[in-house]
Image: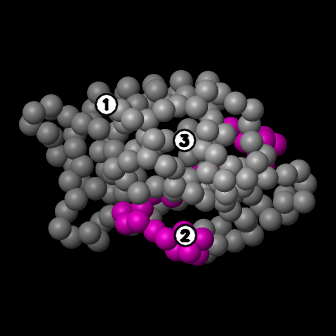
Amino acid sequence: MSNFTFTPEREPLTWDEIKSAVDSGQWEMFSRTTEVLDEYFEWREAALKSFVTVADELKIEVLGYSSQVDPSTGKLCAVRQSDPSHLHDKVLRLNSFPYATKPHGQIQHYVLWSLAELTGDQTEALLKERMPGHEFIHFVNPPHRKTIPEIHHYHVFCRSIDSGSAEN
């Protein structure tokens, strides 16, 4: 995570602003509130007390990797077994540390965690299957904005198709 940079808190983004930022690659438009960043740093600090890396915690807790104690640190590290049947290959869940959006409550920020890299079409198909009646904007952060570069993950903004006509 040494190359990662946090964007200072900005005004929350509307649906149209999210779409515009993704389409134009203006990643600096995305920010988290100070409260969310504080929660992130608290989680990260707690994770690093028990796990070698935060990626190890996510691989174990989210993707179903086995764990073992790393002899050099005494902390848990993720181990991918030769039999992948116990692994969760794609996990879609609300982002615990979401980017700021508005109107409040109308746009959800999910993360799609995946064992393998997905194409845009694969991501779109999975989202339509798992969340019918919603529209999506999804993207992968560029390298300088990735907090967990060791795991394939996709940011997904979602809203009910009915809310599209409300406020963009």
Total numbered labels: 3
Which residue is under mark 3? Answer: 96
Q: Secondary structure at mark 1?
A: helix
Give the numbered dot on residue 120. 2
Q: Secondary structure at mark 3?
A: loop
Residue 104, placed above or below residue 94: above
Q: Residue at x 22, y 59 (%)?
A: 80
Q: Percent position (x, y) of residue 151?
A: 37, 53
Earlier along the polypeptide chain: callout 1 or callout 2? 1
Mark 2 vs mark 3, foreground winner is: 2
Q: Is residue 103 visible?
A: yes
Q: Residue at x 78, y 42 (%)?
A: 102
Task: Give the magenta-colored segment's residue range.
Answer: 99-126
Residue 33, placed above or below residue 28: above
Q: What amino acid is found at the position of numbered circle 3 in the picture? A: Ser
Q: Percent position (x, y) of residue 78?
A: 24, 49
22 and 148: which is toward the camera? 22
Quarter of the image where the N terminus is located: top left
Whether 102 is among the magenta residues is yes
Residue 142, placed above or below residue 130: above
Give the numbered dot on residue 138. none
Q: Residue at x 88, y 50 (%)?
A: 167
- Left or right: residue 22 versus residue 164 is left
Q: Percent position (x, y) of residue 37?
A: 55, 28
Give the numbered dot on residue 48. 1
